[in-house]
Image (cartoon, coloured by chain):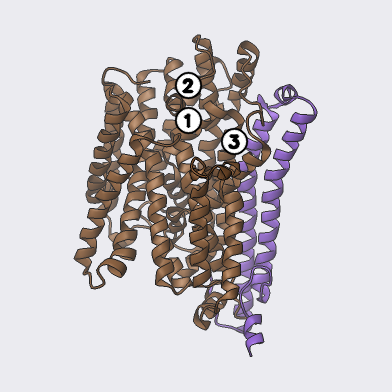
Amino acid sequence: MEESRTDREISFFRPRGTAMRGEVRVIWLVLAGWFAAIVGIQAGVYLLEINYSELLLEEMTFFNLPIHFWLTGQVLPLWFIVLCVLFNIWMDRHAARRLDGALRFRARSGREDE
Amino acid sequence: MTESAVQLLPLAIVVGMFALFIVSGLRTSSRQASEYGVAGGYTGRIGIGAAIASNWMSAASFLGLAGMFYLTGYYAMAFVVGWTGGYVLLLVLMATQIRRFGKYTAPDFVGFRYESEAARTLAALIAIGIAVIYGVAQFRGIALIVSWLFGIAYTPAVVVGAALVVGFVVVSGALGVARNQKLHYFVLITAFILPLMLMARKLGYFWILPQFGYGAAIRDLQQQFGFAWSEPFATVTPFRWLALCFTLMFGTAGLPHVLSRFYMAPSIRDARWGVVWGLFFIALIYWSAPAYGVLARLFEARGGIVPNSSDPMVADMAVLSAARYSGLPLWCIGLLAAGGMSAAFSTVAGMLLTGSASFSYDIYPRLIRPNASETDKVVAAKGFFLLLAVLVMTLALRPWGMIAEIAALAFALAGNTIFPAFLLGIWWGRANAAGVISGMLAGVAITFAPLLAGILPFLASLPPATSSAFIGAPLVILVMVAVSLLTPPPGDGIKLFLARNVHDTAEE
């Protein structure tokens, strides 16, 4: 009895149900893209700086900006917006599929987001 | 940059901007109260986004960030990434779920999820602590602008600023100042970007998008004056950069007044899309702020001032000093000052009101006066508001850092306490009251431990307090997990609520 109750506990690492599993999968993807961009860009900038020179970073420009300013200050916030848009599109479709399933099969009376 | 005389035209613009918000507030408040939150300033997703951005923009965004760029160059990019990247965490991990909980404040959430009055009280005390620290950053910004506007020194400017804030809250409570947050945001963003465009045009840089045009200023500073302002990791290691960046991100996802925003949207879908618009509007500010820092440096260099100033007061006024040095008309500088004042006023008013509400509803009737009536709570809220204002004013007389640094300490506290409590509360059903209380206490200790380095020298090797959540938040999560596993699990009711209402796992 105790074991079955433990199995039903909510856990990010052991999601339950199709809806939660799908949501957690997309969250992992978004977080991976978020983390890799932040750490990756800084690692790249650091390696360029120590292997060459900060002067190289000054000379590598995009839209007038030194490359590290452009990547960190302009691209990263834009990338965060893109990640949020992709997440929301996925969530909207996910909610629509669930709603569609609920209407066709009337299998459950769960509430919907909207 | 204290002047000896009152700046009449900028002062008139500041007063005019507040008058605009009062008129807008009166129009909004004349609508039915029930419309507020749906139609009275939040219409549509763009409106929700503008409300999120307006709520977010404070003296730290308007003045402090440019000051950090002025002083530290590339290191300040950690603030840009931290304060925007935190919204990704907020959206994917929390926005949908906390709305489903149906609790309007952080202490409410903690008390309900962990079924513990002690946890709720602790969360309320932490929320008050965050409000006080964040308020000090705003007071510093207000005092610097008041000092310039009235031509008085910093210390009397803090007192004048505090009196103005208290007066603002009285008026805004009665008249609904800044209630129309869409208008508030668009006035603020115009006040921030228009002077920047004019400055870039005056210098012959790419002025249509000055967010890119400032690259030429970086180059000129380097080539003409040999000042390597943009050098990436000249003064700090990548570890320190990332520690600050992640601390700010965890803090963004844990700030009580940011978390409460999701209840204002009519639906979960609108709340989610509102976050995207909010992030875009916030990014507009952060794409622009570095330009003020570098332009202030460039104008100083051209004016014969050796560009090695490390005075925090000078740095925090970089936005205004860049506009002044460039010879922009006084009305333009007044617009900037009005924008900074407005951003700081609305934020500090919101934070102090949140702090006093936490006291009067989460602490006063539970710990001090169990049978308090609604009238008693209102009196307690007003009294505590004044007490908080005096406390914040006193701390602002001798601030421990620049505007952005002070704000970062509030983010560190939120990232070490509220963020783990929400994260595990939503995503791990086994987390319990003992776990969250231990975790929040550990988070408070981790946040303030680096500040004791003067007394306990071995703490000097830790990252500074403003960067503590990078290691602190994972540590607090470990403490919460360990203590929760060693103590009895939470009740079946809350587990069922999590499974059915928050994560909708009913199909299994």
Q: Are marks 3 and 1 on the same chain?
A: yes
N-term mark: 3 or 1? 3
Quarter of the image that includes the N terminus of chain B:
top left
Q: Name the residue located 31 percent from the left edge and 69 percent from the top edge.
A: B366
Q: Which residue is mark 3?
A: B77
Q: Residue shown at 42%/24% (left/top)?
A: B320
Quadrant assignment, res B14: top left
Q: Chain of mark 3?
A: B
Can residue B274 be spotted in the picture? no
Q: Which numbered disc, 1 or 2, marks the residue that appears first in the sequence? A: 1
Instruction: Point out which mark residue B193 bears.
Output: 1
**Vertical position of residue B484 compared to residue B162: above or below:** below
Residue B59 in view: yes
Q: Earlier in the sequence, mark 2 or mark 3?
A: 3
Screen quadrant of the C terminus of chain B: bottom right
Q: What separation in Å lies between label 1 and label 2 (alpha carbons)?
A: 9 Å
Q: Are marks 1 and 2 on the same chain?
A: yes
Please give left or right for residue B397 compared with residue B66 in the image. left
Identity, as a three-letter code, of the amino acid under mark 1 = Ile
Q: How crowded is the residue under tag 1: few (<14 C-alpha within 10 Å), some, or many (20+)?
A: some
- Say which element carries label 3: helix
